[in-house]
Amino acid sequence: MPSDPVQALAQEPVDHRFKGLPPDAGQAGLTVGELTAQRRSLYTGGFTTPVLTLDAEALSHNLAALGTYAERHGLAFAPHGKTCMAPQLFRRQLEHGAWGITAAVPHQARVYRAFGIQRIFLANELVDAAALRWVAAELAADPDFRFVCYVDSVRGVQLMDRALQGQPQRVDVVVELGAGEGARTGARTDEDCRAVADAVAGTDTLRLVGIAGYEAEVPGADPDSVHAYLRRLTALAAEFDKAGRFQGVGEIVVSAGGSAWFDAVADVFAELPELSRPVLKLLRSGAYVSHDHGWYTRLTPFNRVPEEGGLRPAFRLWAQVVSRPSPTQAFVNAGKRDIAYDLGLPEAELVRDPLTGAERPATGIRVLKLSDQHAWLETDSAEDVQVGDWVALGMSHPCTIFEKWPLIPVVEADGTVTEYVRTFF
């Protein structure tokens, strides 16, 4: 077996665990690598519907776009891995200059470590004793491993300190500044943040290395309120530095940034005054890797700064018309088990004739609702779709698209499948 765990994914058998893949590949006992080498056509190579695909060109474009953006603005980049949970994509993100990968929960960090990720930023307060002991063991076993997580309460600091007693290394933490009343996590006031920092200073198990937050949680977020929140965050970092709270730290971590306001993060982090030691200005956007056809298409900061670049939707879910009971109604064989729907229903994009291979825009076709295994389509006329047609659906919210598909074909413009992306949710 290859010593590289990412390369080792190619040795997995193509079997019943993976939706949409050619049944004959499993019957022949092919591995993922062997199927990849065959470069089958998505349309004629035996794939079954529904099947989720990633557009190879869009994926490459998006990976480069954020890597370039972060470099241009002097930002380190730790894309949020919970979006895709795909080690192959993590590797490509790192190849495009990412500092590390962000996690939200201990399971994700364990996946990252299994695939060799050396820098993990956990954007949550970690108070699970078993998980903290695992982190401590990883740090002790690998001096090159860097781990940073949030703290946002004195109680949390106390729990962390208790769990880490007797461990040989301190765990690095950043105080999370909450985005305001009614927002999600984080210490709500500057005074609360100071109290948390004081609690960290009172331990011999934790080390305060910075300040972080999540600007998208600002209530009623708009450019003015988001910039104001981020300036509170950077001001607090400067205050903590002046007060000597980062003694013994090689670099100060200042982190923010989802996929909706990274332009504001770039603006405000550029204003950060010189501190007593180098600053790691850490951006954490994650949804960019695949982008989407709705939610993030509307929210992406590139809409505000188009001269800085842009992102392309990479996902396409192909489903097949299995019933056409009336001229205005049709059903395809993909539903809630296959389709992301938490941020809106999918949109029909293309129709492909399975007999001729001809594709046409899905004009006059709308998704009305979803059942577990069906999408309900409304059509303008009887000619819009026929039984057997393939319908391509565009969806919103990459996080809940990736999670439904454990192995995803990556497809070139002509339909050739060049790779299979493995996810671990």
Image (cartoon, rainbow, N blue to C red):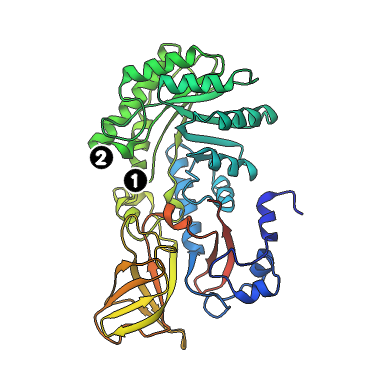
Q: Position of residue 415 (x, y in %)?
A: 52, 74
Identify the mark at residue 260; answer none if there is no mark.
Answer: 1
> 22 above or below 254?
below
Identify the mark at residue 221; answer none if there is no mark.
Answer: 2
> 262 above or below 299?
above
- The quarter of the picture where residue 223 lies is top left
Q: Secondary structure at mark 2?
A: loop
Name the residue located 54 percent from the left edge and 67 percent from the top edge.
Answer: 19
Kindly give the residue lying farthest to the front in the view shown: 372
Name the residue located 54 percent from the left edge and 38 percent from the top edge.
Answer: 106
Which of the two discs, 1 and 2, labels the residue nearer the N terminus?
Answer: 2
Q: Position of residue 327 (x, y in %)?
A: 27, 85
Which residue occupies the foreground of this view, 23 or 381?
23
- Residue kind at label 1, given as amino acid type: Ala
Q: Are marks 1 and 2 in contact (CB under 8 Å)?
A: yes
Name the residue located 43 percent from the left edge and 13 percent from the top edge.
Answer: 198
Looking at the image, can residue 334 be seen? Answer: yes
How many neighbours does mark 1 have within 10 angstroms: few (below 14), some (14-19), or many (20 or more)?
A: many
Considering the image in quadrants, where does the N terminus appear? bottom right
Q: Position of residue 215 (x, y in %)?
A: 33, 36
